[in-house]
Amino acid sequence: MNPQRILKATVGETATLAEVSQPTVLRFAMAIGCKGFQDFKIRLAQSLAFGTPATHSVLLDTDDPETVAEKIFEYTMTSLDWARSHLDRTALRKAIDILAQARTIEFFGFGASGIVARDAQQKFPLFGVPCGAQLDSHQQTMVASMMKQGDVAFVISNTGTTRSIIEIARIARANGAAVICLTGSDSPLASYCDVALIVETLENTNMYTPTISRIAALVVIDILSTSVAMRRPLDDQARIHNMKRQLSDMRKVQPI
């Protein structure tokens, strides 16, 4: 059986492919230590993406700190590699084109996505235009309502189902702003955006699972900001280098 087919198959489809019953598929998943069929597919994806056994990085209550560290590093690298291989390069290029032409950029997010929005906002020297990070729902609505053509609304939601974030995308787009979303799947949010950056990770709902989606989103923000900065005129790039030099000087301890 081709394991790649299982990644997008339902329990019923997997049972048909394996010529067994659906309960047998579920029992098999549980027998190898998975919490269910979805968890089985996540571990299978890990194995295919990184070439390691699917059960190797599963955290156990009996794991010591050294083992936890090893497994979380492994899980993070596996998931980032998966996200990299599934990132739509065409959508990435379109997003960079839009950001490079922006008059202003506003980043919107809640919770962990809000942290990503803050990180993006503090990279405004690389984007080269005024950037904001809106984390409060009322402020988000106010800012989105005032956006216009030439502005870019960058909405962040891993699930892509948060109603208020979808509404922000709708408002900003209705006012003429370009809308880019960073989300974890082909979610409802994507249909309200001009460009959808789908950053798929292997994160699941296990309480011991690290927040891979946020780490992957931060990497994509770095890709976008760096790519936009590289398109700036040489004098703008020189100012960025000067800014970084001055920041470096601030970290140097002066001799007494």
Image (tube, helix red, strand yellow):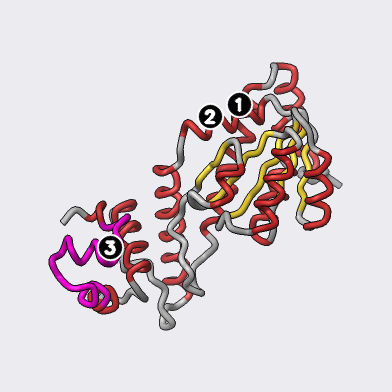
Q: Which residues are magenta?
A: 6-26
Q: Position of residue 165 (x, y in %)?
A: 68, 53
In the picture, measured across the screen, residue 69 lies left or right of residue 23, that is right
Residue furthest out toward the top: 234
Dot 2 crowding, Cα within 10 Å, few <14, some 14–19, many 20+: some
- In this view, the residue in front, 23 or 6, is 23
**Side (left or right) of 38 relative to 161:** left
Q: Secondary structure at mark 2?
A: helix
The residue shown at (15%, 70%) is 20
The answer to whether 178 is drawn above or below residue 143 in the figure is above
Residue type at mark 1: give it.
Asp
The residue carrying mark 1 is 97
What residue is at 33 percent from the left and 57 percent from the top? 45
Mark nearer the N terminus (3 vs 2): 3
Q: Which residue is mark 2?
A: 93
Q: Nearer the viewer, residue 164 or 129?
A: 164
- Disc number lying in front (3 or 2): 2
Give the Cα distance between marks 3 and 2: 34 Å
Which residue is drawn at the image coordinates 42% and 78% (left, top)?
63
Q: Is residue 216 magenta?
A: no
On residue 53, the disc is 3
**Does 14 appear in magenta?**
yes
Question: Helix or strand or loop: what does disc 3 sit on?
Answer: loop
Asked if disc 1 and disc 2 are in contact, CB closer than 8 Å, the reply is yes
Residue, far right: 256
- Cα distance, mark 3 to mark 1? 40 Å
